Structures are given as C-alpha cells and as structure tokens.
Image (cartoon, coloured by chain):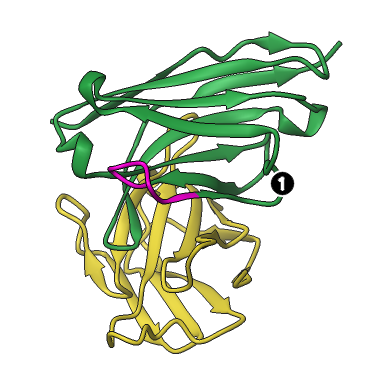
Chain colours: A yellow, B green
Amino acid sequence: DVVMTQSPLSLPVTLGQPASISCRSSQSLVHSNGNTYLSWFQQRPGQSPRRLIYKVSNRDSGVPDRFSGSGSGTDFTLKINRVEAEDVGVYYCMQGTHWPGLTFGGGTKVEIK
Amino acid sequence: QVQLVESGGDLVEPGGSLRLSCAASGLPFSESFMSWIRQAPGKGLELFSYISGSGDTIYYAESVKGRFTISRDNAKNSLYLQMNSLRAEDTAVYYCARVADSSIVYWGQGSLLTVSS
C-alpha cells in the first residue's frame, strides 16, 4: 500500500495567522488517466471527518475559500489562509490513486496558541 | 440530503462477534461504492473494507481479512459488516462511508465497538 506521511503532527497557530500542512506519498499519485487523487479531510473534535479538498485543489461545496490545496506527484500541501477558531481539529490527507488500498496520512492536529 | 446512519456498536468480549449496519438515504445506493473506515481511540483513519454497488468487487485490508465480511442489501439501502474473532485492537469507532471518484464523499456519524473482557 502507498504510505502517506503528514507533517507536522501538531500545529499550534495564532488566530488570523496562516497554517500549512504537508502530505507526502511513497509513490506518485498521478493516475494513468492524468488525474491525481489526493483529498484532504477535516475532523473537528467529537465529529466525523468531512472532506475539504479533492483531486489536490478542488474545494468541496461550503468549504471556506481560506482553505486551499496544492501539490503534485508525491508532495502536497493544505493551506489555511487565516486560521479561525472553528478550524481547530485534525486534518488528514488520503490517496485514491492506488487501489485496492486507499490510504490516509496519520493526521495533523491544528490548535490555537 | 445524504444520510448514513450506523448502528450495532457494542461492548464485546475478545473472540466474540458483532454485526454493524449502515442505513443509507439520499443517494443512489445501488450505484455507490460503500466502505467501512475505522478510527481507534486517539488514532488515525483506516479504510479497511469496501464493496461495489453490485457487490462483485470487495476489498479487505490484511488487518481484517478472514475475520470481517462486508455485504449490502440494495433493496433495503443498507450496508453491513459482520465481525468475527474480535480482538482488543479492533476497538474503534466504525464509520460507514461512500466512495466516489476515488475519494470519500460522505461519512456516517460512527458506531463504537469496544472489545474487552
């Protein structure tokens, strides 16, 4: 299975400041069809995860535009432009390029300083 | 709107069995790849099983292969997970989730399984 490695494990951020989370895959996530199936999920405390970003940089409906995804190949980044209190939680990347095993990163905990 | 509602979580002794159910609404269930994802206490996410809309494609991670069985009833818009030979390390919140375009698009609220004597 493809191994997804996130960093940092914990990210203390000041309200209103930017935050950046890295996700690296053990193999290129470029599919033979040209798409790159890298998604980002947010899990707020006590809640189920919800998807924020799919195919590297596409925001889901209702996701604030302060969230953005970028990257290619094996290196990807989730950026929060100006962190708000509601952004506290754990963020996960996930690869959907290499089946059958769809794999998640270990998670990055975003907290307010 | 889409709703995925898991049920059946419980406290089970090691070696025991349990069946989880997931009732789906608001989506074309019979056309949907469905999955089970689990999260051990304080840990990350593991997608350990999925099933195609027709049921002809099934996947199990090595961690559950031979012990867990995924199934579905499209007439009832329901997904199931039969879990046998349960171990302490199976303790987790179990999420039912829809897979679409190689991503997870909808999640249930989760059902807690605790394996302990």
Percent coordinates x, y for residue A110 in the rendering = 52, 54
Numbered-mark total: 1
* Residue designated by label 1: B63
Which residue ends up furthest to the right in the rendered image?
B117
- Amino acid marked by disc 1: Ser
Residue at image point 15% right, 38% down: B28
Secondary structure beneath dot 1 equals loop
Would you say residue A11 sits in the magenta stretch? no
> In the picture provided, is B70 more to the left or to the right than A82?
right
Residue at image point 48% right, 67% down: A99
User: Which quadrant does the N terminus of chain A fall into?
Assistant: bottom right
Percent coordinates x, y for residue B83 in the rendering = 63, 25
Q: What's drawn in magenta, residue-wise?
A: B52-58
Residue at image point 36% right, 72% down: A37
Closer-to-camera residue (B28/A112):
B28
Q: Which chain carries label 1?
A: B
> In the picture provided, is B12 more to the left or to the right than A26?
right
In the displayed structure, would residue B106 be above or below residue B93?
Answer: below
- The quarter of the picture where residue B2 lies is top left
- The quarter of the picture where residue B97 lies is top left
Percent coordinates x, y for residue A21 in the rendering = 50, 70
Number of other residues with Cα within 10 Å of mark 1, as a class: few under 14, some 14 to 19, many 20 or more: few
Tell me the chief SS of the magenta region.
loop
Percent coordinates x, y for residue B61 in the rendering = 63, 51
Which residue ends up furthest to the front in the rendered image?
B56
In the displayed structure, would residue A16 be above or below residue B82?
Answer: below
